[in-house]
Image (cartoon, rainbow, N blue to C red):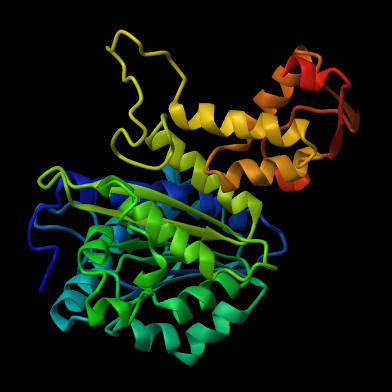
Amino acid sequence: MNFNKEPFDESTKLKLEIFGECFREWLPVFLHDKYTNQIAIFDFFAGSGSDSNGVHGSPLILLKEAKGENRKYCSKIDKDKVINFIFSEKALHMSKELRSNVEKYKSECINANQCGDCVYKISVEQKDFKSAFNDPETQTVLKDKNIGKFILLDQYGFSQIDKDIFLQLVNSPRTDFIFFISSSYVKRFKEHPNTKQYINTESMNFDQMQPKECHRVIADYYRSLIPPEKEYYLHHFTIQKETCKGNYYGLIFGSNHTFGMEKFLKVCWRNDNFSGEANFNMYNDFEEGNLFHVKNSSNKKYKVISELRKSILSGLIVDNISGFKYTMRMGCEPKLFTQVVRELEEEGLIKRAGTLNYSSTNIHNAKRYYFEVCNNANDKN
């Protein structure tokens, strides 16, 4: 089946836009890192590169983002830095189309910008996912702590990213990944042996959730696979198809570094300013035009703010670094934590000690400060 022979629907376009935005946030980090001399970008389910209307699919989107506006990235690549794009597609006819589309894009880009040649190394492989992923060269790259890696897995369902593959991704150093999964299908066929072969649906409690929450349930399943001693960050984004309101699928983002998760969350909240996790109103917020709508407010934020306040005042969160990480694990940007800290200070409920600052970005470089809960905090709160 060639999924690109028809025009992309709006939900597919959104998915592709998020892929592109995430890569746009990711790439400069490693391009400007003087300690990273090699970067590898994998698109394991690359398709043919465009739909029937010529709208770019993920491979061409990645190449466009790698060029940057006015060639702000590719024109400044250090000659000693190697950037590899590896596009894999199982179907022979789609792989041929992909190779043709990539060569056409590359040729047009070189001619338009009068370049001698492309600074990026681009390879197109006709391989199924398991063959491409388990290739010795791929495995060597995945295990190399000196190579920055961006991995895109736009699988056509749910069967490819099983527990073993997921844990390999989680344990791959300097690696950020995004994968797609058909959440409604998993929920609908949770008792089928073919589903259980890849995902342990017995550990998922769909019955207590609304249909629109099925992707969050699946994301929680993958979170449960992460070893408890490992510091890792996972976030999800649910997409509802316009043509079938009961059909939900979604994206799962993974990073072993706080900076990677900051970038992912930034993209998600840019696409959903209510909850940062869906292309629809997940938490029944009052939308713009509604009598009760309040700008920049959301039910999810209210819930997280409440939990942050309680955790700080009860001593569960003792400093800003742990607070930032907690906030991100709740699916919110670190700046929400700083907002809570400011409010608690203004209310006279806490004092801070250490290197005082209100920094909310690049938290891996943030100066640590600690909380002193005032004696009257319980009375006021």
| Labels in figure, total | 0
Residue with the most extreme bottom position = 136
Asked whether, in this view, residue 47 is left or right of residue 234, the answer is left
Up/down of 271 relative to 193, above or below: above
Residue found 32% across the figure and 57% down from its top? 206
Q: Which quadrant, please, contains the N terminus?
A: bottom left
Q: Nearer the viewer, residue 223 or 272?
A: 223
* Quarter where residue 350 is shown: top right
Residue with the most extreme right position = 354
Residue with the most extreme top position = 291
Q: Nearer the viewer, residue 133 or 25?
A: 133
* Residue 17 seen in the current view: yes
**Residue 8 location, x and y as percent?**
15, 52
* Residue 115 seen in the current view: no
Up/down of 148 relative to 214, above or below: below
Asked whether, in this view, residue 332 is left or right of residue 357, the answer is left
Residue found 34% across the figure and 79% down from its top? 198
Up/down of 330 relative to 1, above or below: above
Q: Which quadrant, please, contains the C terminus?
A: top right
**Residue 15 location, x and y as percent?**
30, 50
* Quarter where residue 214 is shown: bottom left
Residue found 38% across the figure and 74% down from its top? 200
Q: Nearer the viewer, residue 55 or 362?
A: 362
**Residue 204 location, x and y as percent?**
38, 64
Asked whether, in this view, residue 358 is left or right of residue 113, the answer is right
Residue found 63% across the figure and 79% down from its top? 144
**Residue 295 location, x and y as percent?**
43, 15
